[in-house]
Amino acid sequence: MIFSSLFFLFVFLPVVLIAYFVVPRRFRNLVLFVFSLVFYAWGEPVYILLMLFTAFFDYFNGAMVDRFRDRPKIAKGFLISSVIVNLALLGFFKYSGLLVTTFNSATGLSVPVPEVALPIGISFYTFESMSYTIDIYRNRAPRQRSLVNYGAYVSFFPHLVAGPIVRYEDLALQLTDRRETLEKFTAGVQRFLVGLFKKVIIANNVALLADQVEYLGSPSALTAWLGILAFTFQIYFDFSGYSDMAIGLAKMFGFEIPENFRLPYTSHSVREFWQRWHITLGTWFKEYVYFPLGGSRRGTLCTVRNMAIVWLLTGIWHGASWNYALWGAYFGVLIICEKLFLGKLLDKLPKFVTWLYSFLAVVIGWVFFSYEDIGQAFQMLGAMFGAGGVGVDNQGLYSLLTFGPMLLIAAFCSSPLPGRLTEKMRTGNVLSKSLWAAGYCALLVVCVCFLVDNSYNPFLYFQF
């Protein structure tokens, strides 16, 4: 089940909201837990058992860590147990095929490749569930004594399958102490509609161009640039749209979950880009990997080593293919260079130059991300910079005329201007406020019309 489906919008969500607000407050987490299981089982009826095992296993380990807090070695043993089992499950379901295939290629053997389906959202809920045991071990959050409350945290359907990655310490107190208000509910609906617009109107439409170019053998330079720009906007509006919808849904139920995007394509360095893109993933790796390794406290060499480890893991987290490792390494090298010397140079350059550097660096990175075949990725890079020998062709001109307006809309919507305009209308006179409210109603109508007429509706990050 996906947020941008008519069934979710007009059946599942209304039923959950009615059930949630009808029952007494003490049963509301139970309602969320039950309906979150229904939400996940709708697409993964078998793997819901895996998700429940992960949740309950970490709940048990968290309880043991808390119980043996005065005996550090035993507590640490339960922490290690939690981390090992979680990573083993994630590794088996996500990476076993890649590892066996790579082993066969390296050795010439023919070890059978396990055919294991990837459970939806496993990368997200594994990291969230692990954070529970780690946060308790670090004494960053209290142990959750209610199994229902803990189940509601891990399985909470707004962020279950594609984030944001909500650490336990971010939600611990809200599980038992939150207030649902009309103001918060209204803000949640508005945020959800913005996300729906991003996904249905922008991401789905630019994806048509991105998909067309991906399957072209030898595109011209113009076609190649249009294709990767389309993917650049597709992945942003697809993923940030999902995050907006998740944050909006959480607000409807009284929760505040972390932001995941802050206009990343306005960045002036690659380092800044990653402070604005998939923020919760970066925070997770910083808190649970980078800092425990020593962060930047042990000299330049150790800092570079720690950053390299984090960025390689960031790439691999995204998928069981070596192009993701290359993608992570690419950004890791750029960020390390900015840390060591490039950042000082960027500080002296004009803002437009630093923005252009950041944007082009990110766009080139998306080439490695979007092509599982690394050879195809370099072929696309070559085409972008004229190696194919054709600069402009009819395919490129047709794509420019057909999709150019949508790319301009995407560029505008990825800038700060829409936010400034809506804020000005929201705080303006009566007419402005009326137009602002009517705009959200129009968003819903337009999005529903597109959903009725369009079957292209996948979320990219579901595969991770």
Image (tube, helix red, strand yellow):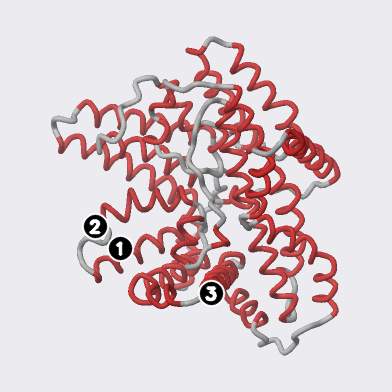
Mark 2–mark 1 distance (CA, rounded to whole Å): 8 Å
Quadrant (top left/top right/bottom left/bottom right) for the N terminus: top right
Q: Dots 2 and 1: beta carbons under 8 Å?
A: yes
Residue 126 at x, y percent in the picture: 44, 42
In this orientation, does residue 3 appear?
no
Q: Which label number is shown at residue 294?
A: 2
Q: Give the structural element (helix, strand or loop) at label 3.
A: helix
Image height of 193 relative to 239, above or below: above
Q: Residue furthest top?
A: 24
| Closer to the camera in the image, 365 or 455 | 365
Q: Give the structural element (helix, strand or loop) at label 2.
A: loop
Identity of the residue drawn at 37% across and 60% down: 310
Identity of the residue drawn at 54% across and 38% down: 159
Q: Amino acid at mark 3?
A: Tyr
Q: Which label number is shown at residue 362?
A: none
Q: Which label number is shown at residue 306?
A: 1
Counting residues from the start of the chain, the first of labels 2 and 3 encountered is 2
Label 2 CA crowd tier, 10 Å (few <14, some 14–19, many 20+): few
Counting residues from the start of the chain, the first of labels 3 and 1 encountered is 1
Identity of the residue drawn at 80% across and 76% down: 396
Q: Nearer the viewer, mark 3 or mark 1?
A: 3
Image height of 357 relative to 179, above or below: below
Image height of 183 relative to 460, above or below: above
| Image-based side of 2 in relation to 169, left or right | right
Q: Nearer the viewer, mark 2 or mark 3?
A: 3
Q: Which corner quadrant of the image does residue 392 belong to?
A: bottom right
Q: Amino acid at mark 1?
A: Asn
Residue 323 at x, y percent in the picture: 53, 67
Q: Give the structural element (helix, strand or loop) at label 1.
A: helix
Mark 2–mark 3 distance (CA, rounded to whole Å): 30 Å
Q: Which label number is shown at residue 357?
A: 3
